Image: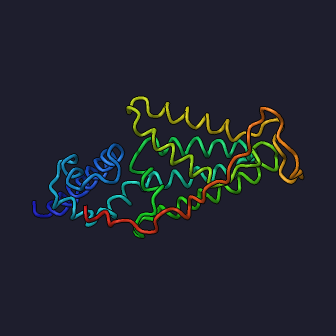
């Protein structure tokens, strides 16, 4: 009888940990990273002491909660870069990153925010940005992506995409896909676009009714705060 006790304790601990992570995914997905730890414990059906025994800080809980999404993000970037068609790779990256964000307000918050050093989402975002820059270079060279596109346009897009979280859950994914489809069409090169490298006369006036050139893209990456309040204090 006594020989079974350690096994039962370990089994209970594993079950509690799994319930906490399931609860955290659900709570952070709907409420974002501002949700308090006590709400996660309540949702998991465990006491605060049990939660903190497994995850001493909120940073630790968030890091483990979104481990699978981070792995998925790495796969999306890798597959997009490996695609022999750069425009298709670019499209798929935009579509799948939007879908990943649509599933969880918390993951979108972590991805878009320079979070404390225990969470390496900043590196995930930079990896995605570098992939977009490389895919954009290839797609522009192939004449498929607007020559005016710059990598910070992706970050601007993801900032706007966060509004999808306000859509009712049942319609959220469809709204995200529609948003991504509109953005991809906006990025697509169209007849009359200047081809990268083609000289454009400074004195050339736009034709009547022609759309004005896009304003310079804001430097969004440099606008991110480099530190945020410690979430473990919440």
In the image, is residue 123 above or below residue 70?
Answer: below
Left or right of residue 32, residue 127 in this image: right
Using residue 138 as the reference point, say whether residue 90 is left or right of it.
Answer: left
Furthest toward the left, the residue is 1
Q: Quadrant of residue 110?
A: bottom left
Measured from the top left, where is residue 124 in percent x and y?
Answer: 53, 60
* Residue 176 x/y as whole percent: 51, 36
Residue at 55% x, 35% y: name it: 179
Compared across the picture, whether 67 is left or right of 211 comes to left
- How are the colours assigned in the image? rainbow
Work out whether residue 68 or residue 186 is closer to the camera in this orientation and state it: 186
Which one is in front, 201 or 101?
201
Which quarter of the picture shows residue 59?
A: bottom left
Tell me: 63 left or right of 101.
Answer: left
Q: Is residue 192 above or below residue 22?
A: above
Comparing 216 with 64, the one in front is: 216
Please tell me which residue is depicted at 45% across the width and 38% down the height of the picture.
164
Instruction: Tell me residue 40's x, y (percent).
Output: 24, 51
Which residue is depicted at the point 22% across and 46% down? Answer: 43
Quadrant location of the N terminus in the rendered image: bottom left
Q: How many marks?
A: 0
- Residue 190 place in picture, x, y as percent: 78, 36
At 18% from the left edge and 59% from the top edge, which residue is drawn? 50
User: Which picture quadrant has residue 221?
Assistant: bottom right
Image quarter where the C terminus lies is: bottom left
Query: Relative to 20, does residue 91 appear above or below in the rendering?
Result: above
């Amino acid at each position: 009888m006594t020989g079974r006790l350690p096994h039962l304790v370990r089994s209970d601990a594993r079950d509690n940990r799994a319930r906490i992570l399931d609860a955290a995914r659900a709570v952070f997905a709907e409420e974002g990273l501002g949700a308090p730890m006590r709400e996660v414990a309540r949702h998991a059906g465990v006491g605060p002491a049990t939660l903190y025994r497994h995850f001493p800080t909120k940073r630790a809980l968030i890091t483990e909660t979104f481990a699978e999404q981070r792995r998925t993000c790495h796969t999306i970037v890798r597959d997009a870069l490996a695609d022999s068609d750069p425009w298709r790779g670019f499209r798929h990256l935009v579509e799948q990153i939007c879908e990943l964000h649509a599933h969880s307000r918390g993951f979108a918050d972590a991805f878009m925010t320079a979070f404390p050093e225990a969470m390496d989402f900043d590196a995930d975002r930079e990896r995605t940005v570098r992939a977009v820059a490389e895919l954009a270079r290839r797609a522009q060279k192939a004449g498929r992506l607007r020559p005016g596109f710059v990598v910070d346009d992706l970050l601007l897009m993801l900032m706007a995409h966060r509004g999808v979280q306000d859509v009712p859950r049942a319609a959220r994914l469809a709204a995200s896909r529609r948003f991504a489809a509109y953005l991809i069409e906006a990025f697509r090169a169209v007849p009359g676009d200047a081809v990268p490298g083609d000289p454009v006369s400074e004195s050339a006036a736009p034709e009547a009714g022609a759309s004005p050139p896009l304003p310079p893209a804001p430097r969004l990456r440099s606008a991110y705060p480099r530190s945020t309040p410690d979430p473990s204090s919440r």
